[in-house]
Amino acid sequence: MLPPQRVSYGRTRRRRTHHALTGTTPTVCPLSGMPKQHHRVCAESGYVRAGLRIKVPKLGIGVPKN
């Protein structure tokens, strides 16, 4: 089945203006001062949010470096 009418080049471009990707904006971890993504664990200190720190010794997250 064919579309009822061809979509013009301008209309296609106007529709695609919202398809551009934006880069992630890192925030600063309040404990270590290192940049981290929103809602992610800081690799240095294990900080996620106030009152929640995660420790994963196998991956070296939230443990002191030797």
Image (cartoon, rainbow, N blue to C red):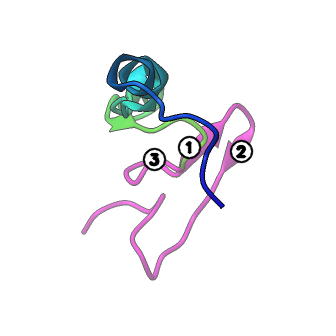
Quarter of image, res 26: top left
> Is the C-beta separation of discs 1 and 3 under 8 Å?
yes
Q: Position of residue 41 (x, y in %)?
A: 53, 50
CA distance separating discs 1 and 3: 5 Å
User: Closer to the camera, 11 or 63?
Assistant: 11
Which mark is first along the chain, 1 or 2?
A: 1
Most distant residue in the left direction: 66
Q: Position of residue 19 (x, y in %)?
A: 43, 32
Secondary-structure class at tag 1: strand
Q: Which of the numbered marks, if any, corresponds to residue 52?
A: 2
Most distant residue in the right direction: 51
Is 49 included in the stretch rendered in magenta? yes
User: Closer to the camera, 19 or 46?
Assistant: 19
Q: Residue at x 37, y 34 (%)?
A: 21
Secondary-structure class at tag 2: strand
Q: Which residues are magenta?
A: 41-66
Q: Residue at x 29, y 63 (%)?
A: 65
> Is the C-beta separation of discs 3 and 2 under 8 Å?
no
Residue indicated by mark 1: 47
CA distance separating discs 2 and 1: 6 Å
